[in-house]
Image: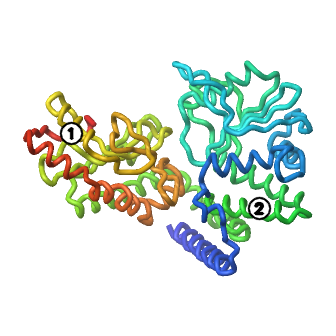
Amino acid sequence: MDRLNELLNKINTIISEEKTIQEEKRKRGENFNIFDILKLSKNECRLHSAFLTELLNPNGSHGLKDVFLKLFLQYIVPDSKLKTETAVVKIEYNIGTINEDKTDGGRIDILITDNQNQAIIIENKIDASDQENQLLRYNNYATKNYTNVVLLYLTKNGKEASDKSTKGEPFKYSPISYQKDILQWLNCCVEKSACFPLIRETIEQYIINLKQILHIMDKKNTNKLIETVTSKDYVEATLTILENESDIQKKIREQFIEQLKDIADRKKFEFYCDKGVCDLSSNNAALITFTFTKPPVLKDWNISIGCDTLADGFYYGVGRQETEKTKEIHKEIIEKSQPIWEEIHKDKDFPFGGAYLHGKDGNWNRWDDYNTLKDMADGTLSKYIEVEIINKVIESNLLKQVEDITSKDSVTVPNDPNNI
């Protein structure tokens, strides 16, 4: 226990040093990030796929022809025989309507082809969850249309695709990461563009953006951290922490649920939480509900936060418990009420809007993600849920509409969040 406490104290010292370094960088303007200012820092299509496509494109506005594409092949796809001088690079390439069994169709994030019928397909997942059979569909398209293809699955940390995306089929693809592969390639691109200041500075700005959203420490502190946790004195304590990773994550989620309970108490909501929210096995459906209790006629309605599986990610919306007795009343409420959140998806389950829990400051749909866990621990995520989700429902006209319409009929049914 003493070794463990010593290790944690040393790690806290390194983290404090990192915060000091970042604050000094901020004062010097080194953290200036135009992409963050424009609210694009995590936008998968409009920034990340678009920026990578432009660099990889031999006909891109950078004017350096296939220099960046050659570096990409050298560092990330060394086995590719792609002819860079004839390469064509396309973004959001449409391969047809998704068919009924979801084995064909969709849009490829980045497609690189040459005049020898060879291709590189990049599925870019900076934040989004896997779609059903997504990689399988791209693999099926590739095998039908190209003689030689490399399928890349690009994520923040190089994780494997879920069975949801591959349908569990054993086709070949390569996981790559922004943290290691893309940053290494981009640093080489900076070197190659040394004599082209505008190109060099733009790539460096993009690197700053990546490091910020990936929470990458200063190299000196990263090395110090790794040396500390793997040293002879502390490696046993480090391994003990790693062995208990799932229990540590579960405890953080449990403490987060307590934060949500406090919010529910303050807002006069009934609170319900599935056990699966804290356990988070990949096959678990999990649900949290804040059920309207003032006045009692609102008890059919609630704010829902949940996931069908961990791979799908957490979403939110306003749901309701519906029976034959309440169906027409709910229909009237939905017809008369306005959407609560702008520009997010409406469907039969969430008629006032619903969306994956990305938020303004992070990607929170994955509750096993380290950045999400950090934001759970320090209260950032619970504050967002209170201000941007719960308060907006309270401030909307929905509660008054539900109260007025249901009170006319005096219909109430027992509340069971599992039936939403």
> Label 2 belongs to which residue?
202
Q: Is residue 110 left or right of residue 1?
A: right
Decide which of 155, 228 is in the foreground and name it: 155
> Label 1 belongs to which residue?
416
Q: How packed is label 2: few (under 14 Cα within 10 Å), some, or many (20 or more)?
A: few
**Residue 256: image location, x then y, percent:** 38, 58
Q: Residue at x 68, y 26 (%)?
A: 139
Q: Nearer the viewer, mark 2 or mark 1?
A: 2
SS category of the residue bearing label 2: helix
Q: Residue at x 41, y 65 (%)?
A: 379
Q: How packed is label 1: few (under 14 Cα within 10 Å), some, or many (20 or more)?
A: few
Marks 2 and 1, how far apart at CA:
54 Å
Above or below for 43 versus 170: below
* Of callouts 2 and 1, the N-terminal one: 2
Above or below for 80 versus 386: above
Q: Quadrant of residue 321?
A: top left
| Residue 288 visible somewhere in the drawing | no
Q: Residue at x 80, y 45 (%)?
A: 56
SS category of the residue bearing label 1: loop
Amino acid of disc 2: Thr
Quadrant of the image containing the C terminus: top left
Q: Quadrant of residue 412?
A: top left
Q: Is residue 363 left or right of residue 184?
A: left
Decide which of 236, 411 is in the foreground and name it: 411
**Residue 199: image location, x then y, percent:** 82, 60
**Residue 132: image location, x then y, percent:** 53, 30
**Which color mode does the image show?**
rainbow
Q: Is residue 224 left or right of residue 333?
A: right
**Residue 25: image location, x then y, percent:** 68, 76
Above or below for 143 versus 191: above
Amino acid of disc 1: Asp
